[in-house]
Amino acid sequence: MNDGTPEQIHVTWGEDPSSSVCISWASPGEAENPRAIIRNATVIRAVLRTYTDGINGQTVYTYHAKLEGLEPDALIEYQVTADNDRNRAHPFSAAVRTAPRGRAAFRWTSYGDLSTPVTGWVLSSPQSRFAVQAVERFDPLFHLLNGDLCYANLNFTAQPEVWADFGRNVQVSAAWRPWMPCPGNHEIEFGNGPLGYASYLTRYSLPGNDTPFPGLWYHFQVGSVLFISLCADDVIYQDSGAFLAGPHPLVPAPCTGNAPIQPGTSIYNHGYSGGAQTRWLEETLARAADDASIDWIVVQMHQDALSSSKYGNGSDKGIREAWLPLFDRYGVDLVVCGHDHDYERSWPVRGCNRHVGRDAQSGAVVDTCQPQPVMTAEQPDGSFDTGHGTIHLILGGGGSSSPLRAYGVDPVSGRPQAKVITKRTRQGADALEEAIWSARRDTETGYGIAVFDVDPGAPGDKTSITIRYYHAVGAERMPTPDYELFDTIVLAKKPHQKSI
Ligand SMILES: [Fe+2]
Ligand SMILES: [Fe+2]
């Protein structure tokens, strides 16, 4: 008999987080009558979604139970089970809180680049267990997971097993509060769909986007904050998805029927949506501009438009060209990313300086679209008004085994310097620019978690988001559960004008 015991249980927001949540899980074999039981009363049949890994031939069974019509700010106790659940007498149970409605205080947390605690997998690290515990310690309403979830695509013949270890590790938090992901370059896998996202998309049930690319980008609103999650693989120049270095071909299991993959093969998803994602982004931002219930716009993506990491990827001009003008036009307040495994915060930026970069080899002038800081100090009251510019945060220190804490410095001027990728490459950035937009860089450790507290403010007052970044000093040498405060900033501005 198949084993339908639920595992890797996690919840995500539906279209409206104040009334809709999806419970998702997997099981070792196909479940019979998979279902969620809500408050010991309502039974919701789960929808089965499967895929068969195109390299090792393993079929993965996942289940998704969508809860709708819930009341806001309510604790929803649930169980998940099946007729062939080994724990059927005592099924897995947890509870998730729906979002408040209207202008309300709430907290979210964020990091990317988590990996798994099973150190046999490439880029996995024991710190990823402590990182999940850190989310629980800060007790947010939900968590943003900024791509590079588990690096399954670096473990070619064991991709589903890596995902399972990831799912088991995050369950202690993700079964209790939504973890909202965006895809990163390491979600692109050989054998799993033309774009490589079949595993990611099968496992996650995410808000819709009314395009031919469901699940890859979406938005949701909590309180007065609109969250927009993007798939930057679509616009970046760097070629950083699945890649086979060789020297030998990768030969899929015969049952898959798939041909061997030759050394040197990569999956390069630049431009895959044909502009559909950018059109959707602009429509979403234009609607938000007219929506009096939205005070703040926060964007989540994996790769970085503003990173001065020395040994990481650096900044990608593709994001600067495709999306930063839209962030400027529609006043995006904050962008959270991962990809470079460190912490960096920008000044608020708006617009860009043209033709001020240099080719990394020849020194010739290169147009890197260098973002312009609109201020290089806090306001007198210690806060930032992001009505004037967008702040970018690199939060790539979830838990992978390759943290970074070195940043570029111009050898002549001594000022911060960034690598910029301006064309397709697997070999690293081709250009350099002065990182005039860089405000704070963590040189002590690459590991950390950001905690965001939204205060809607009293009527007539400013609304604010307090951002505290906690880092795990010493985790490079010895994994640690201790995260201490490193950086605090406050974003403050008048609420949406139409609401006053
Ligand atoms: Fe990463
Ligand atoms: Fe990445």
Image (cartoon, grey):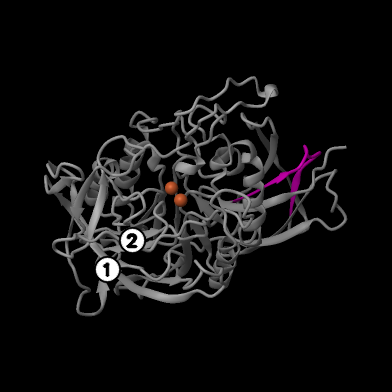
Give the percent coordinates (x, y) of residue 26: 70, 45
Residue 423 vs residue 135: left or right? left
**Marks 2/1: CA–CA distance:** 9 Å
Name the one closer to the observer, 111 or 465: 111
**Magenta highlight range:** 21-37
The response on whether ligand 2 sits within 8 Å of label 2 is no
Give the percent coordinates (x, y) of residue 334: 33, 59
Residue 120 vs residue 79: left or right? left
| Quadrant of residue 333 within the rendered picture | bottom left
Look at the numbered disc 1 and give the secondary structure of its residue. Answer: strand
Asked whether residue 246 appears in the rendered view, the answer is yes
Residue 269 vs residue 149: left or right? left
Give the percent coordinates (x, y) of residue 463: 33, 70
Q: Which mark is residue 493?
A: 1
In this figure, what is the number of numbered marks? 2
Q: Which mark is residue 114?
A: none
Q: Which residue is mark 2?
A: 295
Look at the numbered disc 2 and give the secondary structure of its residue. Answer: loop
Position of 447 relative to 88 (above/below): below
Give the percent coordinates (x, y) of residue 140: 53, 67
Name the one closer to the observer, 114 or 91: 114
User: Which mark sits nearer the N-terminus, 2 or 1?
Assistant: 2
Name the one closer to the observer, 70 or 236: 236
> What amino acid is found at the position of numbered circle 2 in the picture?
Asp
Callout 2–callout 1 Cβ contact below 8 Å: yes
Residue 29 counted in the magenta span = yes
Q: Quadrant of the N terminus?
A: top right
